[in-house]
């Protein structure tokens, strides 16, 4: 049985089963011994009385020994046999049903040797106990067999009852384990729930105080750990943001200087032009990297105003393409003209622009941008003309500063797709990459479709 709860239920069930089985074995053994001893005691007393009676009667008239044995009163269902040593004769109470041949050989041997003995055996499939009593006064041996059927029946009833009891106790143990495991695992579920919230970005979530001392230690340790993680993340976020802000001023100055030199580029020698082009491209790359880092810092901090409006996603994406010089890219949509949803225009524009620029810079340009959706989600897909993304790189390519094999020699910052993923998550979706029909990459972004009666469609 898998899982901690399953193991606890199994442990309680096995413990209850072991305890019930042990108790049942002891109960059955002691009850069996008691019942058999009581039955043997009563039968022995009856057999001794019969032996004494036979000693008196046979001593007076040994010729009528057969009739005397026939009239002996035995236990219900019992049988009596008299053996006269001098005559080597056996007289059975019911010779047609039970004779000395039905007695155990060991009992016969001991009794005929002058020793009193007892032995349990089976006759006609029923349990019996036989006693052999030596009557030296008349040179005779007396045998009496009495049934143990009533004892066996009682023991069978007790055994059946105990088996049902074991089953019920085992089930009760499992039910108790199920109930107890719920109480034991409830704090762990709270920890798991809080940990999930924290992993989703809710670093302000904490465990509530517990009354139990052990659980209280767990809650305090967990909260202290989260505080330390939150402080570290905040320090790193502030550091990245501060560094990006501090770099803006020198980069702006460098960019301005590059623009000034750009106007004098024709005055430079060919070798200096090459050096100048390298400087200009690296300054542009540096500037783009810093801007991307600033945007990621704002995304990590949850900053930025939302621009939610009720618009048609297909129309919005088409306008973004036209505004940023990608009007020539083929466009397709399955959305109707009146299919509108609540959308953060700023995030959508950033997602679309980053995907188009990624295709332009690393994969030979975008060849198709498609918009589709259903009742729950909207999708934006961009197909490029590149060689596609290897299966082993499809997860890592959305990490920060990660580069695919095809883009390692490009001048991008390595943050564009990470920004796309962060914006997609902020919109309740995610981004992934597949292979398009031409063998290139298809980057797909899904966002949660939102509907609201409070927002009104903007005037155009």
Image: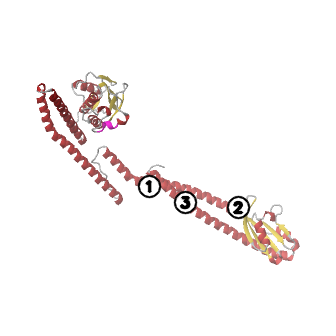
- Find the distance from the CA under tag 3 to the CA under tag 1: 19 Å
Residue 343 lies, in percent from the top left, at 27, 32
If you read the primary sequence from the N terminus, does the residue marked by circle 3 or circle 1 appear first? 3
Residue 146 lies, in percent from the top left, at 74, 65
Identify the disc placed on residue 20.
3
Residue under label 2 = 149
Q: Is residue 77 left or right of residue 299?
A: right
Residue 76 lies, in percent from the top left, at 75, 64
Residue 353 lies, in percent from the top left, at 25, 29
231 w.r.t. 364: above or below: below
Q: Is residue 332 left or right of residue 149?
A: left
Confirm or deny contact between disc 2 and disc 1 (CB under 8 A). Answer: no
Identify the disc placed on residue 132.
none
Q: Is residue 336 visible?
A: no
Looking at the rendering, in which quadrant would you find the C terminus? top left
Residue depicted at 80% across the width and 69% down the height? 72
Highlighted magenta segment, given as a residue range: 394-399
Residue under label 1 = 180
């Amino acid at each position: 049985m898998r899982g901690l709860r399953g193991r606890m239920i199994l442990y309680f069930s096995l413990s209850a089963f072991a305890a019930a089985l042990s108790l049942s074995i002891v109960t059955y053994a002691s009850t069996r011994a008691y019942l058999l001893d009581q039955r043997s005691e009563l039968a022995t007393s009856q057999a001794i009385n019969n032996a004494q009676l036979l000693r008196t009667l046979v001593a007076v008239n040994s010729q009528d020994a057969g009739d005397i044995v026939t009239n002996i009163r035995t236990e219900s269902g019992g049988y009596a046999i008299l053996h006269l040593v001098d005559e080597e004769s056996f007289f059975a109470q019911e010779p047609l049903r039970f004779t000395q041949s039905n007695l155990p050989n060991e009992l016969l041997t001991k009794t005929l040797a002058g020793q009193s003995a007892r032995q349990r055996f089976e006759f006609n499939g029923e349990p019996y106990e036989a006693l052999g009593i030596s009557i030296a006064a008349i040179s005779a041996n007396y045998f009496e067999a009495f049934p143990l059927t009533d004892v066996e029946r009682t023991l069978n009833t007790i055994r059946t009852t105990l088996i049902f009891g074991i089953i019920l106790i085992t089930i009760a143990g499992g039910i108790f384990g199920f109930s107890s495991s719920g109480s034991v695992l409830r704090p762990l579920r709270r920890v798991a729930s809080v940990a999930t919230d924290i992993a989703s970005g809710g670093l302000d979530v904490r465990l509530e105080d517990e009354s139990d001392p052990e659980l209280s230690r767990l809650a305090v340790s967990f909260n202290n750990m989260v505080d330390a993680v939150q402080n570290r993340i905040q320090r790193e976020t502030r550091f990245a943001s501060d560094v990006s802000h501090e770099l803006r001023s020198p980069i702006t100055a460098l960019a301005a200087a590059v623009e000034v030199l750009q106007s004098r580029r024709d005055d430079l020698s060919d070798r200096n032009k090459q050096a100048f082009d390298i400087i200009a491209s690296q300054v542009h790359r540096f500037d783009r990297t810093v801007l991307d880092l600033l945007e990621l810092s704002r995304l990590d901090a949850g900053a930025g105003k939302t621009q939610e409006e009720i618009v048609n996603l297909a129309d919005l994406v088409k306008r973004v393409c036209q505004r940023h010089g990608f009007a020539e890219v083929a466009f397709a949509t399955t959305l109707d003209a009146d299919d509108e949803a609540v959308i953060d225009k700023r995030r959508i524009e950033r997602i679309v622009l980053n995907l188009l620029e990624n295709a332009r810079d690393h994969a030979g340009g975008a060849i198709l941008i498609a918009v589709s959706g259903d009742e729950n989600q909207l999708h934006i897909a961009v197909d490029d003309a590149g060689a596609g993304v290897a299966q082993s790189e499809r997860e890592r390519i959305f990490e920060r500063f990660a580069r695919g094999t095809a883009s390692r020699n490009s001048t991008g910052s390595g943050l564009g797709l990470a920004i796309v993923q962060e914006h997609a998550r902020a919109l309740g979706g995610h981004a992934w990459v597949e292979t398009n029909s031409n063998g290139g990459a298809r980057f797909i972004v899904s966002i949660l479709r939102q509907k609201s009666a409070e927002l009104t469609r903007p005037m155009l």
